[in-house]
Amino acid sequence: MRRTLFTGGRVYTGGQLLDTEVLVRDGRIAAVGDQLDRAGADVVDLHGNLLSPGFIDVHTHGGAGVDINAASYEDLSKLSAFFASQGVTGFLASILTDTVEATERAIDTVCRFMEEPTPGAKCLGIHLEGPFLCLKYKGAMPPELLREGDAALFRRYQTRAGGRVRYMTVAPEVQGVPEMISQLRGSCVLAMGHSDADYETAIDAIDRGVAACTHTFNVMSLFHQHRPAVMGAVLERPVYCEAICDGRHLHPGTVRMLLACKGWDKVVAITDSMQAAGLPDGEYMLGINPVTVTDGDAKITGTDIRAGSTLTLAQAVKKIARFTGAPPEKVLGLLTQNPAKLIGEDHRRGDIAVGKDADFVVLSEELDVLQTWSAGENVYTAANDCVNS
């Protein structure tokens, strides 16, 4: 029985920052409190730094040169290690709209990695971004592969994945999608995005079971006082709103407005990252799309269409703090508790509480990632780390 005691820092628990200790036993949190029993425990001295639940990214297409649509098992191992260096302990593998064959190949690889994980961030499941999306707001989706709602195709993918498809983005105005939403309710979490839906159609989709909005404000019908559209519906109703807080996809003022409208408990920070995350400018791929990255901005080659981002959650936490001026105890929920609740993982992760997995990130006062712990194992330590030294 392995025991580890984290002490000497501030702990983000239950939405608060407390000067307390955390005891881990066999990969789970055994106790949170003061003057815990350290007999036989390995002691990690936080030296005044912050112990947070590990970050969770529910929408990412890759990073460190890895594109999830085309990834091998070894690629996903590399990606997992990279995510750990960014404070991420859990992620959904987002598969961009692709052919049925390519989608199934990607599903097979992700499932193998989930069954045979390597040290790093855990893959918590699959996010299908499409193919049931609209042509007008296709963004980086290949238009020839977009299709009408088809519950049978989703079930084919879900069967192939052994139930590991946790999240799917759909456009509710596309033919057959409203009926599909009703049929799939409870099969996975549904989000709306890449959508030109009017307000009434979007509200109907929420009533049928849509629980979130994919990369809110981006590639969707926006609010107009006479036509509230998708934006009006998701701001009004208590659905979760993803947000790419890189300063490009959303102006800082837009981030502040979204938080003011939705509240801090309904916004989920995502990256929507592609394989260039963590790498220099250059030529890359996103699914079948060639992408050019200039000054960190990823766009489909030869166009002005954004192709995901190069953002990491380690960058996002600092940007959100800077955009809002909010303290860590407000900001951290967007990367921990909220995504965990969105995908139904809050019984195991997203907070530092007894019984949950010991998935942690140690942050400096400036919110730099110093260490990452997965199930009580140290899977990343920064070169300049001072924890436990």
Image: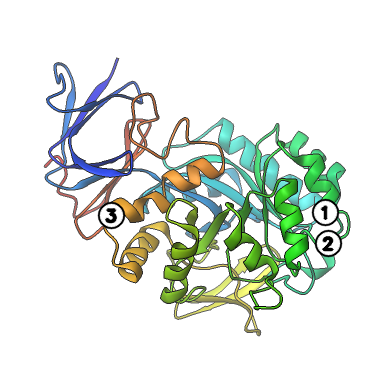
Say whether residue 380 is visible. Answer: yes
Crowding at dot 3, Cα within 10 Å, few <14 / some 14-19 / many 20+, comes out as: many
Residue 337 higher or lower than 354, as above or below? below
Residue at image position (29%, 62%) is 326
| Pick the front one: 254 or 112 | 254
Q: Is residue 309 left or right of residue 252?
A: right
Q: Is residue 359 left or right of residue 262?
A: left
**Which numbered disc covers residue 81?**
none
Residue matched to label 3: 328
- Which corner quadrant holds the N terminus? top left
Q: CA distance from mark 2 to mark 1?
A: 6 Å
- Which corner quadrant holds the C terminus? top left
Q: Report helix, strand or loop for mark 2.
A: loop
Residue at image position (80%, 56%) is 99
Residue matched to label 2: 174
Residue 247 higher or lower than 389, as above or below? below
Q: Report helix, strand or loop for mark 3.
A: helix
Residue matched to label 1: 177
Q: Earlier in the sequence, mark 1 or mark 3?
A: 1
